[in-house]
Image (cartoon, grey):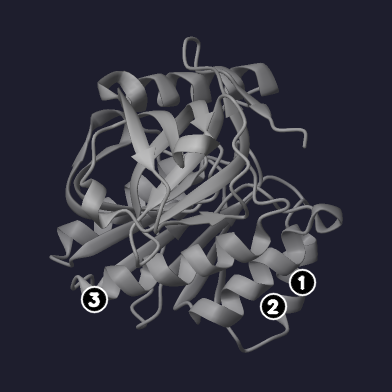
């Protein structure tokens, strides 16, 4: 696929500061396309590049309901990335209701990228920007926590103005504003759901039915498992070993049966329960109504 690269993207002076580069924009702003292009420019300079995908709904680097880090070894066609990966569990396909989890994950993934030797970290944020839904404070909190080298905003109109207006008047972060690519096409909610189902199906293609003992392991928020509930299986550092879909819960045996990719059971520390139900046959998702 040939990417249409607007002239202002090509003319962008690449930020060189020590912090990550935050890329923001609304839904269907082409952030992932821009991030792929930006990573390519840094790679051409000989930089060691890491990508953080902070969108739990439309992730390009991992399955839905997760945030992902990739140390880029190569960029491939179709905006695919080859390289080592780390994942953190969000438990839903939107940051709404999981803001603190998203912020903690952001810090942990960027820190991991630095520990792995990344010289440039590019953070592709979610499309949550509406102040009424928490988008303003989520983005401002990321600026405060991550101390980015720059914030790059892909604008289509005035949709980012509530976020950009205070930042332009602040000295916390340089703000660079760019147009979206004219090749961007909006996606309706049904298209987004189908995309998530394909991503879940691809992830669980190598899954097996596993019985996971619960004795000596934490369950967050509590051991109340629902059929088809999505579960994050985490190590003691909070990184994802595998995703699981609840098939059955056996409280009398202190065990839960999951559809999950095989993982080193001895490393399992915590079962983190999500707010999402995923059908193990169609892989369509629905919000869990407690």
Q: Position of residue 68 (x, y in %)?
A: 38, 51
The residue that mark 3 highlights is 115
Nearer the viewer's eye, disc 3 or disc 1? 3
Q: Secondary structure at mark 3?
A: helix
Q: Would residue 6 be seen by someone viewing this image from the given angle?
A: no
- N-terminal-most mark, 3 or 1: 3
Quadrant of image for the N terminus: top left
Q: Secondary structure at mark 2?
A: helix
Disc 3 and disc 2: Cα gap in Å? 31 Å
Classify residue 135 as left or right of residue 233: right
- N-terminal-most mark, 3 or 2: 3
Q: Residue furthest top?
A: 281
The residue that mark 2 highlights is 168
Q: Residue furthest bottom?
A: 171
The residue that mark 1 highlights is 165
Quadrant of image for the C terminus: top right
Q: Could you say which quadrant of the image residue 17 lies in? A: bottom left
Classify residue 246 as left or right of residue 101: left
């Amino acid at each position: 696929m040939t990417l249409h690269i607007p002239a202002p993207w090509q003319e962008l002076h690449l930020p060189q500061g020590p912090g990550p580069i935050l890329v923001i924009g609304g839904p269907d702003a082409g952030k992932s396309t821009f991030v792929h292009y930006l990573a390519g420019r840094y790679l051409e300079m000989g930089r060691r590049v890491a990508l953080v995908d902070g969108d739990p709904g439309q992730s390009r680097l991992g399955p839905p309901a997760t945030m992902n880090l990739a140390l880029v070894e190569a960029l491939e066609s179709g905006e695919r990335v080859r390289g080592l990966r780390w994942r953190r569990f969000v438990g839903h396909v939107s940051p709404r209701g999981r803001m603190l989890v998203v912020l903690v994950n952001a810090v942990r993934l960027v820190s991991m990228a630095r520990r792995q030797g990344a010289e440039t970290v590019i953070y592709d944020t979610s499309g949550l920007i509406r102040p009424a839904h928490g988008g303003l404070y989520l983005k401002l909190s990321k600026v405060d926590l991550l101390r980015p080298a720059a914030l790059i905003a892909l604008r289509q109109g005035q949709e980012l103005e509530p976020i950009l207006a205070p930042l332009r008047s602040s000295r916390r972060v340089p703000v660079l504003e760019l147009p979206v690519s004219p090749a961007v096409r909006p996606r309706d909610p049904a298209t987004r759901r189908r995309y998530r189902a394909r991503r879940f199906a691809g992830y669980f293609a190598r899954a097996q039915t596993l019985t996971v003992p619960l004795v000596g392991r934490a369950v967050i928020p509590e051991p109340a498992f629902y059929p088809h509930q999505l579960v994050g299986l985490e190590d003691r550092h909070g990184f994802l070993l595998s995703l699981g879909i609840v098939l059955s819960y056996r409280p009398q045996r202190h065990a839960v049966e999951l559809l999950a990719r095989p993982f080193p059971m001895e490393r399992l520390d915590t079962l983190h329960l999500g707010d999402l139900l995923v059908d193990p046959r169609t892989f369509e998702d629905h919000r869990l109504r407690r």
